[in-house]
Image (cartoon, rainbow, N blue to C red):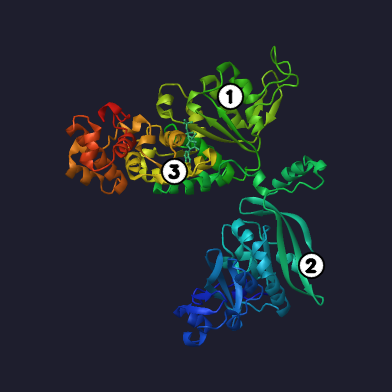
Amino acid sequence: MESDSKKNGCHPESCSSGVIRLDADLCIVYLDKAAEATLELPSASLIGKKIDHVADLANLGNLMHGGISFSDQVILIGGRRIVCDFVPLVENDLMVGGVLSLLGSIPDSCNDTDDNLREILRSTSAFMNFDFDGIIVVDRNGIVVMVNQSFARLLDTTPQAMIGRHVDQAYQNSQPSHLPMVMETGKPDLGIIHYFNGKQVYANRFPLIKEGRVIGCVGKILFMDIREIPLIARQLQAAPESKGHPHTLNRKEILFKYDTNSIVGQSRKIQEMKETLLRVAQKNSNVLLRGESGTGKELFAHAIHAASTRHYSPFVKVNCAAIPEHLLESELFGYAEGAFTGAKKGGQIGKFEQAHTGTIFLDEIGDMPLYMQVKILRVLQEKELTNLGSTKQKTVDVRVVAATNRNLEQMVKEGKFREDLYYRLNVVALTIPALRERKEDVYPLTMNFIEQFNVEFGLSVEDLDADAWEIFKSYDWPGNIRELRNVVESAFNVVSGHLITRAHLPEQLTQLCPDTTVDSVGIEDFIRASLGKKDITQIMDQFENLLLRKAVEFCHGNKQQASRLLGISRQGLYKKLSRQAIGGSDMDDSET
Ligand SMILES: Nc1ncnc2c1ncn2[C@@H]1O[C@H](COP(=O)(O)OP(=O)(O)OP(=O)(O)O)[C@@H](O)[C@H]1O
């Protein structure tokens, strides 16, 4: 029988913490009080010492020397196991030192790890952290002694929170671990499907046997989601053999165009929405996305799919407003061979079937005709559909994400939208706020689009000038993010330098925020209005413009005299007039 403390496990104590700064040779240059306490030596005797003289780093030492960061790894200090992170300090591509953060110790009282197992852990800890597949190691008592980041991430936790706990306590929201059973039988458990935090994973488990004795057990997750397996098989089958080398599967290839990271925005509203989205995505409920046109409803729909367990299955978009009414039914539900004149041989699969096991995105759902609403409701309720021209019922498993910018409640009242369908779709409603309600997102969105268009246009635009930013901030963006994106794109068509200025923006924006000129408000007010919005070159430009015009005016248009008045050559004056686009700047010899 295990003691209670063992059963409950122990996890790192926060008391053994601290920060140690190291130089390029991994000698201690600074340590805080907490680290001093953890090392149990006064700082004076530690400064200048090599870190591997005071701690057993095992293979982690190689990583530190190589300037490679790691987190949640175990080192030994005075026989105690301390969980730590390492971040190298790099200048001009050279490692100039690093910071070792001690996160907490795993108490000895909870850890009578076998020496043989300790040795295995010491020699494998470094590579385990970088393994893409999830790996966990428990000692013979079932206490987690090592777990890598991939594994912990699957459980929405960190290695630090798991190490030291009994494996029964360490898995949240999952089937109980089979590792204790494998240790009991001493036999490997291969190709097992295990339910882990909302996903079915494919795993192997091996007992660790030394001198005929089980000293622990390793679990290794081979596929983080078993739906990956047929996909990989399909990709391998389709691999071009003619190239002479096997097609290596890049996991990115099976990922998506957009995911939650594609949603740019730092406003509280958008951050909260992203959190809700991640929570909602894990469930299977239908989602209704509301928001004005261009707020990002489609982007959110993609992100929900990408964050859901359906993400290896298709995401199928249907724009309900764009499909001619007479084609809607066959588009959505497919048709059987010979269903109507001109029907394809073999029939056609509909959008719902295409989305089987995945997500269907019904955009502009408010534009769906009433008779089609009934049919959609049936698919949602019965999970069954019938192809046009057929009597055979087919089962479909789809999650519906619908979107609209129309007032569905009003449409229900007016009898234009079915109430029962409304409730079916509105299980989870997410309303994306208009851009004018979260102006703080204008900056990150603009910078994000600048980055995208730099690649697309082959330019190196860096920023907007202060005046253009002012316009962006005061404009209301009725077309929301789509309009912002279009404005940045149109600026890319005319910009030549590193900055987007007022001159590159469309009239609809600049008209609403007229420029303050010296002429319109006078010198004092112009300076007051410009400081902080325009830089010195722009302000001086305005003064030069005024001065040039006044000089030419004073000389009744005689540029020769005006140039003398300004103390510059005639050519110099023409150049300046031309640069400032002041009229009559063509060389006119008659004036000489
Ligand atoms: N938060 C965001 N971060 C980055 N890009 C965004 C964001 N929101 C929207 N976009 C971009 O803005 C454009 C419009 O977004 P989207 O098509 O998703 O809007 P929508 O609400 O579905 O519009 P509509 O109602 O007109 O169909 C797209 O190019 C999209 O990628």
Q: Which residue is labeled 2 in the image? A: 185
- Seen in the picture, residue 113 relative to 229 is either above or below; the reply is below
Observer-side mark, 3 or 2, equals 3
Callout 2 touching callout 1 (CB < 8 Å): no
Residue 538, numbered label: none
Residue sitting farthest toward the top: 341
N-terminal of the two: label 3 or label 2? 2
Residue 162: x and y in percent read: 59, 66
N-terminal of the two: label 3 or label 1? 1
N-terminal of the two: label 2 or label 1? 2
Q: CA distance from mark 3 to mark 2?
A: 57 Å
Observer-side mark, 3 or 1, equals 3
| Horizontal side, residue 569 vs residue 322: left or right | left
Cβ of mark 3 under 8 Å from ligand 1: the answer is yes
Per the image, label 1 sits on a secondary structure element best described as helix
* Residue at image location 36% in from the left, 35% down from the top: 503
- Density class for disc 3 (Cα within 10 Å; few <14, some 14-19, many ≥20) is some
Tell me the kind of residue under disc 1: Lys
Q: Which residue is labeled 3 in the image? A: 445
Q: Which residue is labeled 1 in the image? A: 375
Tell me the quarter of the image containing the C terminus: top left
